[in-house]
Image (tube, rainbow, N blue to C red):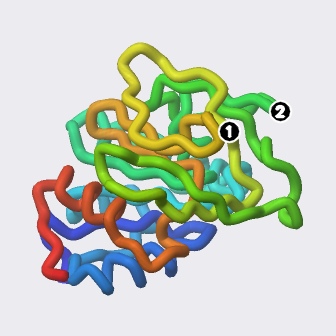
Amino acid sequence: MANSHSIGILAVQGDFGMHARMLECLGVAWRLVKHASEFGEIGGLIMPGGESTTMLKFFADEDLGPAIKDFAARGKPVFGTCAGVILLAQEVLNPPQQSLGLLDISIERNAYGRQIDSSVQQGECPELFDHPVEMVFIRAPIIRRVGNGVKVLGRANGLPVLVEQGNILAATFHPELTEDGTIHRYFVKKTGGTSSK
C-alpha cells in the first residue's frame, strides 16, 4: 500500500523494474506511477533510463510533465537516471529536444555512442563512497555544462556523472544495475524515508 514515504517510479517506459528491485532490496516502500493523479500518494519520484523522446510523448498525453514540475516545485525529491536526466535538464543537445528544465545543466544525448559502445567504468563519489564506484553507462548522455547552483557528487573520467540541485538528484549512469544501493539509499534519505537494509 502506498504512503507518503513511498517512492514512486515513473513506469511509462524504460528500466523502471530494476529500480523497483533495488528499492525492494533496501526494504523501501515503492509503487509504479503512470498517471498524474498518483503523485499525491508518493514522497519521491524516480525517473528511469529508457528513451527520452518516447517518454516525452507520454508526458504530453497524460499530463505527466506538469505533474512532475508541480511535484518538484513543492520540494519533493526527484531522481533521474540516464534518460531521466535528459528529461530533467534545462538544455538538451544532439539534437535539441524539449525537457522539464528542472536541473540547471546542459546535456548531450547518446554522447558515449551507440548501444554497442556501452561500458562499465570506475568513478569517484567522495561524499557518498570512500572507494571507486562501479558505474554502468548505456547509450549514456554527457553533462556538458553545470550551473552555479548544481553540486557535482560524482565524476568518471573527469566528467560530472552524479549531480544534485536542491531536491533534484541525477545520474548519467545506471546505479540500479549494480549491487550497491548507496545512491538509492541517499535518495531515499532525501525523501525523509529510511531503508531497512
Residue at the image point whose x is 76% and y is 56% from the top: 139
Looking at the image, is 108 positioned above or below residue 121?
above
Mark 2 is surrounded, within 10 Å at the Cα level, by few (under 14), some (14 to 19) or many (20 or more) other residues, namely few
Quarter of the view holding residue 152: top left
Q: Nearer the viewer, residue 169 or 96?
A: 169
Q: Which element is circle 1 on? A: strand
Camera-near label (1 vs 2) is: 1
The residue singled out by tag 1 in the image is 142
Q: Which element is circle 2 on? A: loop
Q: Estimate the x, y position of residue 144 in percent, counting from the top left.
A: 66, 26
The earlier-in-sequence mark between 1 and 2 is 2
Mark 1 is surrounded, within 10 Å at the Cα level, by few (under 14), some (14 to 19) or many (20 or more) other residues, namely many
- Tally of numbered discs: 2
The answer to whether residue 122 is left or right of residue 151 is right
The residue singled out by tag 2 in the image is 95
Residue at the image point whose x is 62% and y is 68% from the top: 13
Residue farthest to the top, as pictured? 148
Task: Identify residue type, mark 2.
Answer: Pro
User: How far is disc 1 from disc 2 in space, using C-alphas?
Assistant: 13 Å
Q: Estimate the x, y position of residue 32 in percent, counting from the top left.
A: 40, 74
**Residue 64 visible to an observer of this rendering:** no
Task: Identify residue type, mark 1.
Answer: Ile
Q: Estimate the x, y position of residue 11 in percent, counting from the top left.
A: 50, 70
**Residue 18 visible to an observer of this rendering:** yes
Residue at the image point whose x is 48% and y is 71% from the top: 176
Quadrant in which the N terminus appears: bottom left
Q: Nearer the viewer, residue 188 or 32?
A: 188
The answer to whether residue 63 is left or right of residue 159 is left
Q: Nearer the viewer, residue 125 or 145?
A: 125
Quadrant in which the C terminus appears: bottom left
Q: Are marks 1 and 2 in contact (CB under 8 Å)?
A: no
Residue at the image point whose x is 40% and y is 58% from the top: 131
